[in-house]
Image: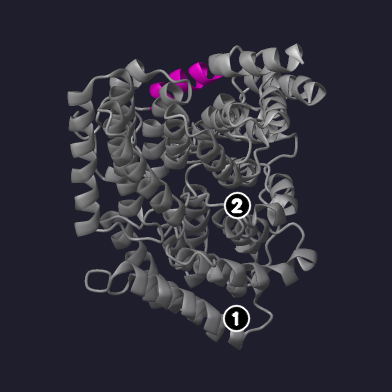
Amino acid sequence: MRTRWLALSLVVSLALASPLAADHGEGDVHGTVAFPTSCSPAVQARFERAVAQLHSFGYDFARTGFQAIADEDPACGMAYWGIAATWYHPLWAAPTANELASGRAAAEKGAQIGAATEREKAWIAAIGGFYADYETADHRTRATRYRDALAKIADTYPDDHEARIFQALMLLGTASPRDTTYAQQRQAVEMLKPFVAEHPDHPGIAHYLIHSLDYPELANLALDAARRYARIAPSSAHALHMPSHIFVRLGLWPESIASNLDSAGSAIKNRALFPVASSFDELHALDYLEYAYLQTGQDAMASEIAERAAKLAGVEQKNFAADYALGAIPTRYRLERGDWRGAAELVDPLAAGAAAAYPYAAAIPVYGRAIGAARSGDLPRAEQAIARLAEIQRALVASPPPGVYDWAGHVEATRLAAAGLLARAKNENDEAVRLLTEAAELDRKVGKNPVTPGTVLPPRELLAETLLDLGRADEALAAFEAVLVEAPNRLRALSGAARAAELARQPERARTLYTLVASVAAPDSQRPEVAKARAKLAAK
């Protein structure tokens, strides 16, 4: 383990020394896509490059490419299919009103220009079906319509593998957030698997396999795709980041750190071209970096990441993942380290007048403030924060965000968890355990949103800590170990489980867990729980 950490230290130092570390010396590489069109042969290679960028969610980059093709070849209706596709982000937040209007305008332009083949006309009509009646038809209806249109293209033209690959993406984009069997995700995997050997350098195949398997029960199956994707599209900040989704699921912190250092470096390199998109890519990578540094007890590095993210807060954002990162990073930094007084001072972005486009992201520091206040004894402030979480949750129930994730359920889980800690602070212990148990079960049901490396202080971990505090060590150990099934190698959960095992008179299990704490942490970690684990191991 120490050898691996020393190797990672070299990776880290090189990445921090130069923001161009993500270039890999491979030029401008986005993978290989085969998407024949009837457009001018002079633009065909650039069309396929733009499609490759689209597969890596490089929407601004792809849009620029498609627009240049449309300018050069005005008869290329498919260029407008591409432009329209860049305004719809199936796995992110639903398009805004401006994005919908822009997407429909492009789709209508493509339909007006037309195409020389029925297949291309079907592609243009498919994206047009998503935008056509957005004022009256809900997002899910239109997304399902697009998914089904892609399926029809793939059935009609079996050699058009792009239709099947984009259909797999839309299966993910229309999956039910309440389906814990992951039926559509598994269907997408089965759809993509036959293409892996035939198209080894295709960015979408590897990318969508990662998203399809981004669940605790399935993540092991995605390691190959995770390790290939960054090599397929080394010029994409998102492609460099995506492997860390699987690394996080498996608790592979050094790999996650290296992945996101590369991604952040690539985003910096591209900032001059697309400052808003690049700031989003950087913030997204920084959120994952913050999480991984905290799980390895590298608090000084986590502090640097928090300061770096704060400097990006003034850049106009177009994506909820950026707002999520801006709320999550400072909240994680305080809560993971047990800085309860610092957490109690976290600012409510909505109360401060920040943009309210994504209230579920704004709820994160409110949750942090509620926990910090409850644990530091400031009960009135905790009550106020819990009331704010209830307001945000009610608004989300009244007007659910389009998409496949239950944000109202997520915010409710955090409210219940904070209320449980408040009950514990009031010595209402039965109520505390009831509320925290309810929060933990709801959080498990809702699951982790793909945008985040993990829930900011999971409710089940808070339940476990409360049970341990109440002297119920056996129950606490079971709860900590349940956290570790969902989030392997979480430092607080490992440390808590070790303490619980010790108090439950399970010395061998305690030693195993203390060994894991010491091995997961970086060699130079000064975190108190790491020092305690090392002392316990040295005493035996």
| Secondary structure at numbered mark 1 | helix
Find out whether residue 306 is within the magenta segment.
yes
- Is residue 117 at all visible to an observer of this figure? no
Seen in the picture, residue 115 relative to 101 is either above or below; the reply is below
The mark that comes first in sequence, 1 or 2, is 1
Q: Residue tagged by mark 2?
A: 216
Q: Residue tagged by mark 1?
A: 154
**Towards the viewer: 387 or 323:** 387
- Crowding at mark 2 (Cα within 10 Å: few <14, some 14-19, many 20+): some
Seen in the picture, residue 21 relative to 436 is either above or below; the reply is above
The reply, left or right, for residue 29 in relation to residue 133 is right
The reply, left or right, for residue 342 in relation to residue 524 is left
Give, as a single range, the part of the protein colored magenta: 301-312
Q: Report the Cα–Cα distance between label 1 and label 2.
A: 31 Å
Q: Nearer the viewer, mark 1 or mark 2?
A: 2
- Is residue 132 at all visible to an observer of this figure? yes
Question: Which of the labelled discs sits on residue 311, or is there none?
Answer: none
Task: Kindly identify the amino acid type of the residue bearing the numbered disc 1.
Answer: Ala
